[in-house]
Image (spheres, helix red, strand yellow):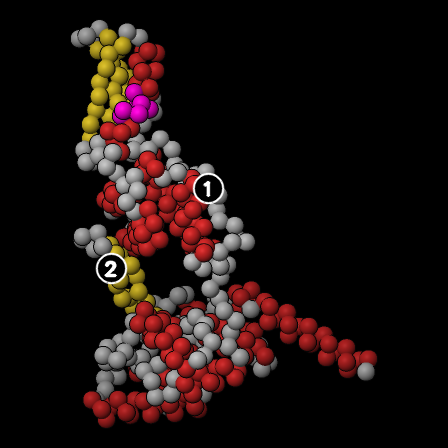
Amino acid sequence: MRDGTSVWYSEKHKRWIFQVSFRDSSGKRRAIQRRAKTKSEAERRAIDLARSPNLKSRRNAAIDVQGLIARYVEFQKMRVRSTSLANSVHLLRLYVVPVMGNRSIEKVDSAAIEDLMSSLAQSNLRTSSINTVRAKLHALFAFAVRQGILDSNPVAKVPRYSESGGKPSQVQSPWTLEEASAALAAFRDSDLEAFLLIALSTGMRKGEILALRWSDVNFANQTLKIQRSRGERRQLGLNGDVEIKLTEGAPKTQASVRTLPMSDELAASLLQLRNHRFQLRGLATNEHIILGANGAPMSPSYLTRAFNRKLKEAGLRRIRIHDLRHTVAHLALEAGVLLEEISQGFGHSGVEITKRTYASVVQALSDRFAKKVSTILFE
C-alpha cells in the first residue's frame, strides 16, 4: 500500500480493516479506520479515501509555504548538517517566502514555480542561483509528498532554468592595470588600504588575507606565510533563525598553505602600518592585520559591503572581491609570468586548474606568440 495507508484482517470483526493516517492542519497525527468485506475492496477504498478532497482539505487547510518550511526544518534537524540546512532555509526565506510564503501549499502549482523563477531572473539573479533555489524548493515539496501532505511535487514538472535566461555569472572582467592603480590611490588611508594592497600584490584569497596576523609576516625575509583562512558559515539557532558564525581554520587545500614573497612596496606599507598600530595602542604579534572600524578582526561580510561602498564613492568599476585575484592573474600572464609560478603563488593544487581558470588569457597569449613567431620568420 502507499504511504499513510494500511490494510489487515481483524479476527474479532471478521472483516478487513483499512486505515489512512495523516497529519491535520495543526501537525497532529490522525487516523481514519473503515471495514470492508474483502482485501481488494479494503485496498481500493483505502486509496480512494487517501485521495479524497475531504481528507486533503483536513490535512492542508492551514498549511502555507512558510509553515511547510518550519515543518521541514524540524524534520531535518537531526538528519542533515546544520550548515547545509541553514543554507537551504536561508535561500527559501530570502527568495521564496516574500513571494509565496503565505500561500496555501495546495495552491502552489508548476505555473507558480515558473513565475517565481522568472521573477528571480528579472531581478538579475544569476542562472545557477535560480536553479539552486529551484532545487531547494524541490526538496521542500518532496518532503511534503513523503509525509503524505501532498500527492505530487509541483516542482518536478518545472525544468531547470535555461542558461539563456537569468544572469549567467557574477564574474566580472578583471581590472586593467590603470583601474587597479586608480583603486590603490582611492583606497589610500582607508581601513581597506592594506587589504587591497595585499590582494593586488599577491593574488591571495579574501579569507586568507583576513586571517593574516603579524606573526605571519617576516620583514627580514620579506615573506608572508599563509596558513589559515577566515570565513563565515550559516547555522540554525535554537529558535530556528539563520545565524552567521565567523570561522577561522585551515585554508582551502593543502596546497594553499604556502609562503609568498613581498614586494618592497608591500613590505614598506605593512611595516608602516605595524609601527602606527604599535604607537597608537601597542601591538600583539598574534593580532590580525586587517581590522574593522571597531578595531576587531574584519568579517567577510563587512569587507564586501565596505569594498563596494568605496568603489561607488570613488567612481570605480565594480567587480567582486574574488575578481581581484583574476586581475592579478591576468596582469601576471600579460607580464610573462609562467603558469606554474602563478599556480604555486595562488595555492592551486595543480597547474591544470590554473590553465582551466584562465584559459581565455592563455589562448590569447598563445595567439600572440604565434603571430610574433610568424613575424620573425616571414617579415
Label 2 amino acid? Glu
Q: Is residue 302 left or right of residue 172?
A: left
Q: Which of these two is toward me, 34 or 208?
A: 34
Report the amino acid beneath label 1. Answer: Val
Q: Which residue is mark 1?
A: 158
Give the image quarter of residue 252. bottom left
Q: Residues within 10 Å of mark 1 (few under 14, many from 20)?
A: some
Residue 352 visible in image:
no
Residue drawn at point x = 36 percent, y = 71 percent: 304
Image coords of residue 346 (percent x, y)? 47, 73
Mark closer to the observer (2, 1): 1
In the picture, residue 369 is in which quadrant?
bottom right
Viewer-proximal residue among 15 and 11: 15
In what quadrant of the picture does the C terminus appear? bottom right
Pointer 2: what residue?
243
Q: Is residue 209 positioned above or below 4 on the image?
A: below
Left or right for 244, reference 168: left
Residues drawn in magenta: 49-55
* Residue, far right: 378
The disc label shown at residue 206, or none: none
